[in-house]
Image (tube, helix red, strand yellow):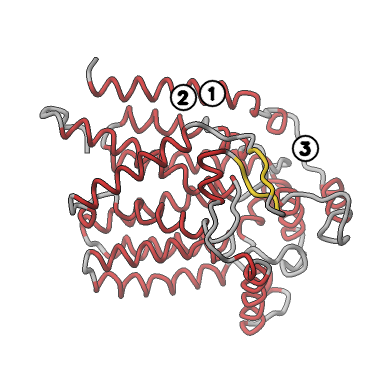
Amino acid sequence: MNKKNLIVFILILAILFNFTRSFHLLDLKKITKNVFNLKYYENKYNQSQWIIPNSKNPVGDDVVYAYAGAKYILGTNPILIMPEHPPLGKNLIGLSALYLKNEYYFSILSGVFALFSFYLLTQMLLKNKIISLLLTIFLGFEPLFVANYFLTLLDLMILGLINLYFYFFIKYSRNKKYLYLLIDGLIFGLIISVKFYGLSLPLIISSLIFLILKKDYKGMVVYALSLSISLLILIVNYFQFFLKGNNLISFLKLQKYIYLFHTLGRKNDIFLTPSLLTLIFQGRFHIGGGQFKNENHFSIFWPISFLIFLIFITKTFFEKKLRNEKTLIIILWVAIYSFFQSLTYTNARYLILLLSYLYLLSTYFLIKLINDRSYHHHSYP
């Protein structure tokens, strides 16, 4: 079998495997028959742990995001309902709920956005449209992803934005056009306007380490300037907050509250744990008190891709080629994001921002191994 066709064959089998495991998760009624009901969400929210301590009717973030987003659009101050995350993502859910009459349109569109941007990034690195498309379809049928197509969560939207961030960052690394770093500043601003900015710290660290390894000091200065664009984007997305009479001092106090909310609660939990590795290799996540629960969406591709990643970076490091590796920014992200997720207990939702790049790097490495043994596959990286 042709070596190129071998990769294609493996990906097709992987797609079929994922599809059989995720088919039951395709809750199409939420797209075809659901009509947004604000009263339903309001009742669930008012009876939940967000209003009643130790409530027997707890709700997930998806319910609160949908309720908060709709209320924001109707004029409620964002500080009054779930201010722990910035308003952009919740606003978009609210717009979908109120104007499209279905909150889950946001979820599907977020999935399409994430997959399209992943394809752009993959095609840039693999330089093979067929393999890039198959890898994107494989990711699209990943059970963990399929479940999120029908939940009003923000992770797929964040993934799409990070894909674009890497896309333009790699473009900058190739031609040193500072415009791409400024575009990344805008994208980063959108990222921190969707979820707590602490999530994005690994992205900044990865980018700075990349620029340091490349000895691109001018790029570091431009990158630092681009973060001022990010801050401006974040402030603009709090327009509803400012329309209620709040000022910049109030905004800074709110950001301090958000930081304390996300850090003080975990103050005693900050230590290296095997939680991430337990989740990836055993499909179990921590539920407190030293107890673990099986993750329903666990896939054999999680440990396989992680092991291939470890082999890839080990081989590249000892060959002293890591600094010049074209996927370096993504390698840094996977390593640093994994480290951050190992500081405390993690869960499968946070794997969405990791698995995409593990799959991409695994495919890239396998193609690279094939190319090292052949002379005529010019379409590969």
Residue 269 percent across, percent down from the top left: 62, 65
Q: Which residue is mark 3?
A: 35
What residue lies at 31% left-to-right and 31% top-to-bottom?
129
Q: Which residue is mark 2?
A: 15
On the rendered image, what quadrant is the C terminus found in?
Answer: top left
Which sits in the foreground, 228 or 57? 57
Which sits in the foreground, 356 or 244? 356
Q: The residue under label 2 is which amino acid type? A: Ile
**Lateral position of residue 105 relative to residue 333, left or right:** right
Residue lying farthest to the top in this orientation: 1
Q: Is residue 240 above or below residue 148?
A: below
Contact between labelled residues 2 and 1, with CB atoms less than 8 Å apart: yes
What mark, if any, has residue 19 been given in the picture?
A: 1
Which mark lies nearer to you, 1 or 3?
1
Q: Secondary structure at mark 2?
A: helix
Residue lying farthest to the left in this orientation: 375
What residue lies at 39% left-to-right and 28% top-to-bottom?
134
